[in-house]
Image (tube, helix red, strand yellow):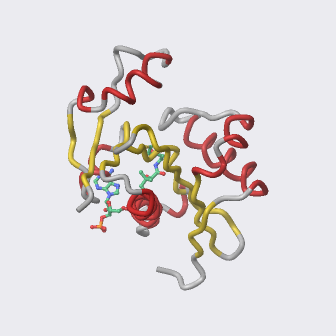
């Protein structure tokens, strides 16, 4: 890993960079696009990875319930993939779960194998009822979601 890599919570000046990263993946159908207004109001959920002054990855942790949080909006810039950065971004979210006192962290994703590789188990979506009540019911794909639910339970 490059020693100039910085992993930190996002701040307002990062929002346009996060938006650009998410849009690059969203136009390929890899994740949901997010509007700038959404990103400004959720900026405190985000981590960014910065190398040589450039944002190369982002990821967000969204608490959903008293013992459940979601890892979402995970993108590594295309030319930076395969260097361990996705794992670093997810682990930053997992570490924050521990700080918040949350033991169960999940993602809804097309990247099932990546998440399995870094310690998340594939589960049925109905083990995440709070997510379904709060968000999924408003999604145009509901109830025919083709994403995989993956879950890690922290020690
Ligand atoms: C998914 C994504 C974040 C992975 O990022 P990355 O930086 O390339 O992944 P890493 O290099 O950290 O991979 C960590 C490990 O998972 C493995 N891995 C990565 N992608 C994998 C895949 N599709 N299938 C199986 N294993 C995979 C890597 O080989 C690596 O293993 P190792 O530690 O034993 O060497 C990246 O491909 C991406 O941004 N995709 C587009 C957006 C997206 O789909 N986001 C997920 C939405 S929830």
Q: Position of residue 140 (x, y in %)?
A: 49, 15
Residue drawn at x 33%, y 25% as measured from the top left:
146
Q: Position of residue 122 (x, y in %)?
A: 21, 41
Residue 29 in the image: above or below residue 21 = above
Q: Quadrant of residue 25?
A: top right
Residue drawn at x 78%, y 57% as measured from the top left:
13
- Frontmost residue, 78 versus 130: 130
Residue 56 in the image: above or below residue 23 = below
- Frontmost residue, 129 versus 5: 129
Q: Is residue 79 left or right of residue 133?
A: right
Instruction: Single out the residue that lies furthest toward the right.
Output: 13
Q: Quadrant of residue 68?
A: top left
- Frontmost residue, 30 versus 148: 148
Ligand 1 picture quarter: bottom left
Residue drawn at x 63%, y 52% as measured from the top left:
44
- Frontmost residue, 141 versus 10: 10
Instruction: Single out the residue that lies furthest toward the bottom.
Output: 3
Count of marks, rendered view: 0
Residue drawn at x 60%, y 33% as measured from the top left:
33
Q: Quadrant of the C terminus?
A: bottom left
Residue 45 in the image: above or below residue 140 = below
Residue 142 in the image: above or below residue 124 = above
Q: Position of residue 52 (x, y in %)?
A: 68, 76
């Amino acid at each position: 890993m490059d020693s100039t890599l910085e992993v930190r919570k996002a701040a307002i000046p990062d929002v346009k960079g996060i938006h650009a990263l998410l849009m690059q993946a969203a136009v390929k159908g890899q994740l949901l696009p997010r509007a700038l207004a959404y990103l400004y109001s959720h900026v405190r959920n985000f981590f960014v990875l910065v190398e040589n002054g450039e944002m190369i990855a982002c990821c967000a942790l969204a608490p959903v319930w008293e013992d459940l949080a979601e890892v979402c909006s995970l993108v590594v810039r295309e030319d930076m993939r395969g260097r361990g950065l996705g794992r670093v971004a997810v682990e930053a979210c997992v570490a924050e779960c521990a700080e918040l006192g949350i033991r169960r962290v999940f993602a809804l994703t097309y990247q099932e194998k990546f998440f399995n590789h870094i310690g998340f188990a594939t589960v049925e979506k109905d083990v995440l009822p709070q997510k379904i009540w709060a968000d999924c019911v408003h999604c145009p794909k509901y109830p025919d979601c083709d994403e995989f639910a993956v879950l890690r339970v922290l020690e």
